[in-house]
Image (cartoon, grey):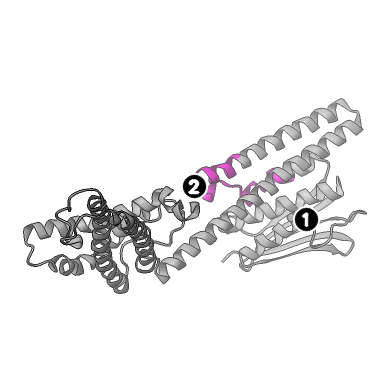
Amino acid sequence: MARFLRPLLRGTTYTRLVHLWVPMLVVGLWLFVDPSTPWVPALVLIPVGLIPSVRRGEGVQARLLLTPSEEDSGISETPSATWRDRWRTVLWLEARMILGVAGSFATVWLPLIAFGLGQLATGPAPGGIPVLGTARPHWAYALLIPLPLIAFYGAVVGFGELVTVLARRLLGLSAAERLAALEERTEQLLERTRIARELHDSIGHALTVAVVQAGAARAAGNAQFTERALAAIEETGRSALEDLERVLGVLRESRQPASGRPTLADADRLLESARASGAQVDAEVAGPLETVPGPVSREGYRILQEALTNVLRHAGAVPVRVRVTVADGVLALEIRNALTAAIPGPGRGSGLRGIRERAALLGGSARTGPDEGDWHVHAELPVR
């Protein structure tokens, strides 16, 4: 019983009822003007439905009244882009008017019939209710009162469900709109993945440098070296905070331009940070680095950052050779360092996987693993 009555406790049931009554206002107004031509409102809806913006208005109204609690109702809120959408809007307007008239009559007359049955059971015959005709009062009519009330309940819930189903079918997203929504969702997922990588690479690099510097300072027991280590930790932490602000800026404002993120033009900061941690970095840059497009340069910076972070994390203060080359439409990044006892496997860790994913996202490739006695990271990114 409680499940049967549950729709009466939902606000959606009553907003759908309001949606059904709205067309009746137009029909009722016209019948007041000219009751001899009740078909005129349905005829007028044909050219009205062909107006592109009408579909948007109907979609907004349907989402607010028919599916107010659903985040993704499948109902479009955009103007008609094709003739198919326009004719679907016309069909929706006609169907909505028919359902509105039927639903309005049902939700108005059924309670009146129940009231009339109550009058027949307790007193004189009611007037103005054609369904009851010339029935004479009798107590047995009280047994019939639940029938119109049950029918009223079914009309309220049933007509509401039916108009919602029709709205999803006739005002639903077209194929082009579904494709656009899918592309937008894909862009959102890619953006979330990119933000996760930004945090992993930037904060991971800063923490690795800080840990290496702090450990080296404690082991050295030298005041000057400790002062240099603290300065390096401070600088690395400041850079990490700047990167964190950029990433949080993306979360706060999805349309913020990506130009604020670091590029390979800022690679000196990475190299100096690695040198301050004790690594002997031999860096070489060849080719017109300024011609590299922004997205490629930014991803190249992150690949270099992750590679240097892995060196400090797994190998410590060892000689590192860094080569950045721009030639023949390709940005090549090569980072080599001496192997240690702990060799990460080619598929372990999100850092190495992130390097390969960044390269693949731009149509390039990346290889990581042992090579001729060194740990080798090699990435190639197309710049055209």
Is residue 60 visible in the rendered image? The answer is no
Of residues 37 and 134, which is closer to you in this image? 134
- Quadrant of the rendered image containing residue 16: bottom left
Q: Is residue 380 magenta?
A: no
Looking at the image, residue 161 sits to the left or right of residue 203; the answer is left
- Quadrant of the rendered image containing residue 204: top right
Q: Residues within 10 Å of mark 2 (few under 14, many from 20)?
A: few
Prevalent SS, magenta region: helix
Q: Which residue is mark 2?
A: 256
**x, y percent for residue 227:** 80, 28
Looking at the image, residue 146 sits to the left or right of residue 293; the answer is left
Looking at the image, residue 90 sits to the left or right of residue 351; the answer is left
Earlier in the chain: of badge 2 and badge 1, it is: 2
Mark 2–mark 1 Cα distance, whole angstroms, equals: 30 Å
**Furthest-bottom residue in this view:** 84
Q: Does residue 217 sit above or below 366 in this rendering?
A: above
Q: Which residue is mark 1?
A: 349
Of residues 335 and 177, which is closer to you in this image? 177
Q: Which residues are magenta?
A: 245-271
Looking at the picture, which amino acid does disc 2 mark? Gln
Q: Is residue 259 magenta?
A: yes
**x, y percent for residue 170:** 35, 68
Residue shown at 34% from the left, 63% from the top: 163
Looking at the image, residue 317 sits to the left or right of residue 170; the answer is right
Mark number, residue 178: none
Residue shown at 83% from the left, 45% from the top: 279
Is label 2 or label 1 in front?
A: 1
Q: Does residue 69 sit above or below 378 in this rendering?
A: above
Looking at the picture, which amino acid does disc 1 mark? Gly
**x, y percent for residue 364:** 65, 67
Of residues 343 and 131, which is closer to you in this image? 131
